[in-house]
């Protein structure tokens, strides 16, 4: 059976303006690869209702799982929850279970649960909450879309909350061979190897550092024996 | 006149598997912001013909400029040039001007211009070459799509080759105010400010470090006077 396919939607003007360098994509990519869910596409878009709704609908239809990051805080530019509700034509309002989580959290910290903070308890009808052990305000899952925070520490904690509930496939195994020769010299044999192992993904990533150049050849697949056989052949050719 | 709108397409299995952390998106975002071209969307996809062709066609239609990174080297997994040709229904073959650039480069370095390296001279009909001062093999522009390398040093050099030829709009100006209070406390006044300045983009980015928490409030726009006025009002409220 093929692995489940996933997409990610990164939401935030600050990424597209170059102010902030996103790190959530790289974190999620690594975690999904470990459990055998194939991340096939990532989109980054700004804080615009129409763009968010259209992207959520397109990705939700095309993939088994969708993960969003960003836009679920208390300020006016946090519009993700409303967009998700609109994308699935659901009602959205402050929900008692989410309000209770926030009330307990702010009581502990001695802060007021004011109207802005209460916005973070707005959850689309039918969604399931996702635990946030860092700062309490929950994410949620609606249909196949997991809605997570943008702050990296919170995003990461929410991903850890979600992962145990996903049924993955066979984890992707990868082996890397460092070859200190130009890509142009190894391309021929590498192409033949790729043709002989159509079930493996064989990638070549050139490097150049301190006057040494070459390529990292990465062999990826789900069958460890097949990977080891291909790697042995590669080593025999180049070392 | 509104600023030109751009999209980026990052091509590469290694980003989606979590092996490599992309840095080209952040670099391009900053450069485009400086010259007044608005980056509105980024997509990351794998080394698959169908996915690349579909994404190029969709983004080329929707935006004024498209920039791709990755997949133009000499190995079997470098399929971007062929996909771009297919997306625009153009012929593709080794082109004399590109071959001459490679021949001169490899003669200088004493390396053979073998069939694999010659693949990097395959250019779709009607495309214009983009200079690569780092490692010679050129990128190219076809219609409104700029096809650039994935290796960050080469990508960056190619972006610098392309930028002077783009006509930008008014550069985005941004001012940041650090406020050491929870986002929930500043959300109310911030929302009012955003409503009063609909031409500005006002974003709030929470931080929490060494026990201090608060938010960076970023005011972005094209009119410096308007930004300064909004910033002064923000400072008056919070400091």
Image: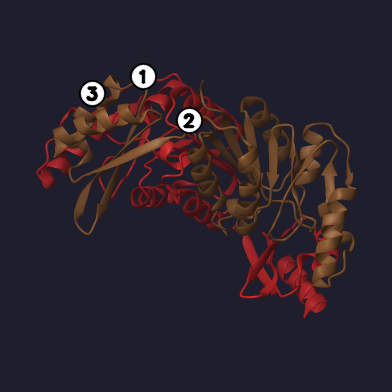
Chain colours: A red, B brown
| Secondary element at image label 3 | helix
Q: Position of residue B21 (x, y in %)?
A: 54, 56
Left or right of B225, for residue B137: right
Question: For numbered disc 2, what is the local secondary structure?
Answer: loop
- Mark 2, residue position: B170
How crowded pointer 2 is (Cα within 10 Å; few <14, some 14-19, many 20+) is rated as: some
Nearest the viewer among A21 and A195 is A21
Disc 3 with disc 1 on a shared chain: no
Name of the residue lying farthest toward the left: A110
Residue B202 sits in quarter: top left
Taking depth in this image into account, of B48 and B156 the one nearest to the observer is B156
Mark 2 and mark 1: Cα distance apart in space:
40 Å
Q: Earlier in the sequence, mark 2 or mark 3?
A: 2
Q: Is residue A236 left or right of residue B71?
A: right
The residue that appears at 54% across and 53% down in the rendered structure is: B23
In the depicted structure, whether residue A79 falls above or below residue B34: above
Q: Position of residue B167 (x, y in %)?
A: 60, 32
The reply to whether residue A77 is visible in this rendering is: no
Q: Which mark is residue A91?
A: 1
Q: CA distance from mark 3 to mark 1?
A: 25 Å
């Amino acid at each position: 059976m093929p692995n489940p396919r996933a997409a990610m939607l990164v939401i935030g003007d600050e990424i597209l303006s170059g102010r902030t360098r996103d790190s959530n994509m790289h974190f999620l990519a690594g975690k999904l690869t470990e459990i055998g869910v194939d991340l096939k596409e990532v989109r980054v878009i700004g804080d615009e209702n129409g763009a968010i709704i259209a992207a959520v609908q397109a990705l939700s239809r095309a993939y088994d799982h969708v993960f969003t990051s960003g836009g679920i805080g208390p300020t006016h530019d946090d519009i993700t929850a409303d967009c998700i509700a609109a994308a699935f034509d659901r009602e959205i309002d402050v929900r008692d279970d989410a309000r209770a989580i926030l009330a307990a959290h702010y009581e502990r910290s001695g802060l007021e649960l004011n109207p802005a903070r209460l916005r973070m308890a707005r959850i689309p009808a039918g969604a399931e909450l996702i635990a946030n052990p860092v700062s309490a305000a929950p994410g949620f899952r609606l249909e196949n879309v997991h809605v997570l925070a943008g702050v990296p520490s919170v995003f990461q904690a929410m991903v850890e909350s979600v992962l145990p509930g996903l049924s993955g496939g066979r984890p992707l195994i990868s082996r890397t061979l460092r070859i200190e020769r130009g890509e142009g010299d190894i391309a021929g044999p590498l192409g033949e190897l790729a043709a002989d192992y159509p079930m493996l993904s064989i990638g070549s990533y050139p490097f150049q550092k301190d006057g040494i150049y070459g390529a990292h050849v990465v062999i990826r697949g789900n069958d460890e024996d097949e990977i080891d056989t291909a790697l042995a052949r590669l080593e025999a050719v180049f070392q």
